[in-house]
Image: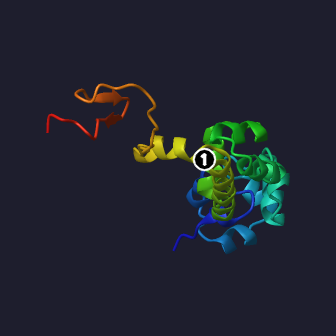
Amino acid sequence: MTEDLTSIDGVGPAIADELTSAGYTTVDDVHDASVEELAGVHLIGEASAQAILKGDDEAHGGRPSKLEKYKDDILEAAREGLTYEGIARVAGVGVSTLHAWRDEHDQFSESLERARAEAERELIQDVDAEFVLERSYDYVKTEKREVDLDADVDGTHDVTAEFVTYSAEDSDDE
């Protein structure tokens, strides 16, 4: 049975494939290996082998994830209503990296979506609700107004104003 070797700190999909090809099919197989044995696997050097065995993801020679470094800033940017592109700029990464982090880290993804929902609620309160309703729900505002008309009007003709029609009540033609 092959286990998911990417659950080991410092082991990504490419290294997991190389470990499996080299005969390491379980997490225990990897942990039981020596530094020299792991360092002999393609894509793994001595520093990476030591990091894998110590469970130290940042020490394996790869670039540390910016997610942990900028996670609080990312969530704050989401709470401020920034787009995904804007949020990614806060962390200094591309939007595709931000989406990859969402896909790979369920807890981060949930936190990010909650933060964006908070921003959405705030933004909706700050904008003209009528504008949002018109654009999102095809809402059309209509209103009825009473108008006092103080003018000399010939009772035989209807007088029309915008949206309202007035006619003489005491017409002799009826």
Q: Position of residue 34 (x, y in %)?
A: 79, 65
The one nearer the camera, 112 or 142, is 142
The amino acid sitting under disc 1 is His
Residue at position x 56%, y 57% in the image: 21
- Residue 18 seen from this side: no
Up the image or down, 98 lies above or below 72; here it is above
Q: Position of residue 84 (x, y in %)?
A: 64, 42
Q: Which residue is mark 1?
A: 99
Residue 146 placement: quadrant: top left
- Residue 133 seen from this side: yes
Q: Position of residue 51 (x, y in %)?
A: 82, 58
Crowdedness near tag 1: few (<14), some (14–19) or many (≥20) residues, C-alpha within 10 Å: some
10 horizontally vs 59: left or right? left
155 horizontally vs 18: left or right? left
Residue 164 placement: quadrant: top left
Q: Quadrant of the C terminus?
A: top left
Residue at position x 40%, y 44% in the image: 138
Residue furthest to the front: 172
Up the image or down, 23 lies above or below 64; here it is below
Q: Position of residue 161 (x, y in %)?
A: 37, 29
Residue at position x 74%, y 59% in the image: 37
